[in-house]
Amino acid sequence: MVYSYDDINPDDYIRSKSQAKREMTALQELGEQLVNLNDAQLAKVPLEPALLEAIHDVRKMPHREARRRHLQYIGKLMRSADHDAIREAYDQIQDKSDKYVHLQHRIERYRDQLASGDAKALQDFIQLHPGVDVQHLRQLVRMAQKEQAENKPPVNARKLFRYIREQVEAQSE
C-alpha cells in the first residue's frame, strides 16, 4: 500500500525528547517573564492560585540556586495551566508597554526638536495637533531654550514635555 501526505495525521506522531525539553524550557521562560511583571500587570493574567503563590515566592529569593530551582517549579506548574491564555495575556501587556514606550520616545523627540529651535518641527506639531494653544507652546519653547542656554535645571523642558504629552493624548482619544 502506498501512502500519500494526505493520509498522514500529524497528531499520530510522538514528540521527541528534544521537542519536549524545548517546550518545557519555553514554559519556564514564560514563568520567569511573569515573575518580572508588577502586581497590577500580574492581576491581568489568568493564573491558578498555586502558580501565583509560586511567583510571589520566587520574588523574595536571591538570585542563586534556590531561585533557579523555584523557576523550574514554576515551569512545571505552567505545564498544567492554560499556558496559551497566559501567553496571550502576557503578550497584550507587553504590547501595551511597547506602545507606551514608543509614545514617550515620540514626545521626547518633539520636545528636543522644539527646544533646539526647529521651526519646521513647531509648524508640523501645530498642524498635527490643531487644538494646541500656539502662544502657550511658543512661550514654553522659549523658556526651555533660555533654560538650556543658561545651563539651568530643565524645569521648563519638563513643562514643555507635559504639555506636548497632553496634546498628543488629547488627539489620540
Image (tube, helix red, strand yellow):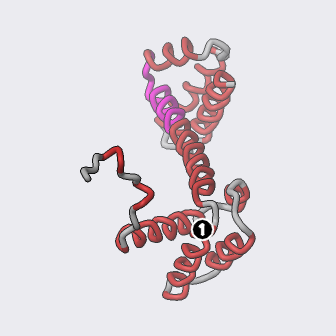
Q: For the point 36% across and 52% down, which residue is it?
A: 8
From what the image shows, is residue 123 above or below residue 75? above
Residue 49 left/right relative to 171? right
Magenta stretch encompasses residue 106: yes
x 60%, y 31%: residue: 160
Residue 35 horizontal/vertical position (percent): 60, 68
> Where is mark 1, residue-wise?
35
Q: Secondary structure at mark 1?
A: helix
The range drawn in magenta is 105-119
- Where residue 85 sits: x, y (%)? 62, 54
Residue 61 in percent (x, y) is at 60, 82
Residue 51 x, y percent position in the rendering = 67, 71
Residue found farthest to the left: 2
Please, is residue 73 above or below residue 168 in the view? below
Residue type marked 1: Val
- What secondary structure predominates along the stretch shown in magenta? helix
Residue at 53% x, 44% y: name it. Answer: 98
In this picture, residue 44 sits left or right of residue 148: right
Q: Nearer the viewer, residue 19 or 28?
A: 19
Residue 117 belongs to the span the image colors magenta: yes
Looking at the image, residue 149 lies above or below residue 7 = above
Instruction: Say which residue appears at 45% left-offset and 16% top-offset.
Output: 119
The image quarter in which residue 156 lies: top right
